[in-house]
Image (cartoon, rainbow, N blue to C red):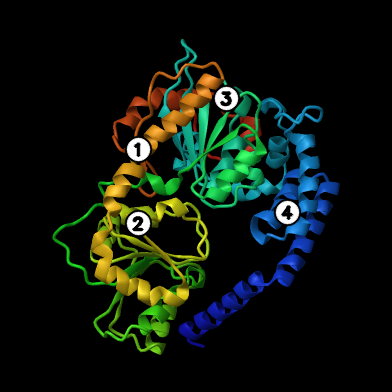
Amino acid sequence: MKASTYQRMRAARWGALEGLRESWLARALLGCIDLGRAFARFRRGQLYLALDSASRIGRVLRVPGLARIACRLEERIWRQTILDPQTGAPLPAAENRLVDDFRKGPAADSFRGGMNTWERLVNLGGELMMLKAPDLDTGELGVVIIKYTPAFGRFAALYDLSRLFEHYQVVLEPSWIGYHDPILQLFTARERRVIVEAQFPEDEATLRATGSNLVPVPFGAGHWVDPRNFHPLPESEKEYLGVLIANWAPHKRHHLLLDALAKIDDPTARIALVGYPWKEYTQERLHAEVRRRGLAGRVDFYERINRKEVNEVFNRSHANLLISRKEGASKILYEGLAAGTPCIVLDDHEGARPADINDRTGIRAPACDLDKALEMMRDEGHTFDPRGWWCENASPPVTTERLEAALRDAALAEGRPFTRGLALKTNDPNLTYIDPSSADEFRASYEHLSTLLRPDEEIRGYRVRYQRPEDR
């Protein structure tokens, strides 16, 4: 069997599963399975895993009746682990039993790492960054940011949060939407407010409804695009109706864009697909879909190109497309805006912040009218102001100021001073200081942070391989 045929069959299977997920009956059946699994885990004392199963019903499956039952189970577990059973207020970090349950249970297996140096242990393999050093004399707290949802589990497992909260404020930058997630509850603590980036309004509302120490801010990983990599190129000429940047998997819904292009009679109308292989899915499957629609010569593929080349493709495109059903804190949308390319976002997409798609940045459109949206952008895209909006609302300096304001409010509410700002960072695509010298300036602070790791005997199970500086 040719690989392309195999991939088409796998893609068809994926499409069938997606169709089942749209069925209320199928979601209800999956919800019953999750609810049964949650109660079984609860009876076995696997409290974190029970929360994980129960939270899926409202977070992923969205079955209201079952979600209410699941919420009652979750509240029961919270009162056993993270909340004072008498007052309902968060317990101190040292008494958060959910962290202990997570660390000792099988849920932590997927978060266990292979950090092979002392530095990579301290910064979680590059997924933790120091934004501000603590002042041990005045009591002004330092600030650390943790990027990617799985890193939150590693952080809670490797660091003593009770001791760490004495010296640091924590910022969490999730990589996926759906914040009714027990991994965030590992940070529930009475003594310290934790800032959580929440690009998707539904996630912001979820955190505000908890009334806990988890404080949402209305921006996310996409708001840290490096302007040195993504910017307008005035000399570029437009040659593509639109560009779609996504891996080659079927859930990115390339077929909707290909269908839209096939409806446009103009043989000079072309699109660009930028991506990389994902699991068994490669370009070959999409080349077959292009040929099947008679679009040969109208679709250009770019695989594993660097950020400079991505910026060039943005500048040669009338529109940047976001057409998947669901994304985390998508950087692609904001990279396009920084490059000066307006966006087209499908109206059934979840993840992009609706307010960020406006009369300066782009449009939303139904899949059935995607062809019309592409033609409209070709004719009227020059009337938008994506770069101007991005500079004013989503650039790293602006986002840093908003984060500083949230951290200042949290510190002052706790009776702590906040007199110094944060180091500027970007997502490039991972955590990167805009000024490379910041890494050296914070060296002593990273050394201090290392003293807040759990004892060796507690982190040995994480298979870390390192040498402490004094042992070298």
**Which of the two labelled residues, at mark 4 and mark 2, occupies the earlier sequence position?**
4
Looking at the picture, which amino acid does disc 1 mark? Val
**Which of the two labelled residues, at mark 3 and mark 2, occupies the earlier sequence position?**
3
Distance between the Cα atoms at labels 4 and 1? 38 Å
**Which of the two labelled residues, at mark 1 and mark 3, occupies the earlier sequence position?**
3
**Which of the two labelled residues, at mark 2 and mark 1, occupies the earlier sequence position?**
2
Tell me if mark 2 has few (under 14), some (14-19) or many (20+) residues whose alpha carbon lies within 10 angstroms of its own: some
Compared across the picture, whether 38 is left or right of 289 comes to right
* Placement of 207 over or under 85, stated as above or below: below
Q: Quadrant of residue 24?
A: bottom right
Residue bearing the label numbered 3: 165
Compared across the picture, whether 325 is left or right of 32 comes to left
Tag 1 near tag 3, CB within 8 Å: no
Looking at the picture, which amino acid does disc 3 mark? Phe
Nearer the observer, disc 4 or disc 2?
2
**Which of the two labelled residues, at mark 4 and mark 1, occupies the earlier sequence position?**
4
Residue bearing the label numbered 1: 398
Q: Is residue 259 visible?
A: yes
Tag 4 near tag 2, CB within 8 Å: no
Residue bearing the label numbered 2: 359
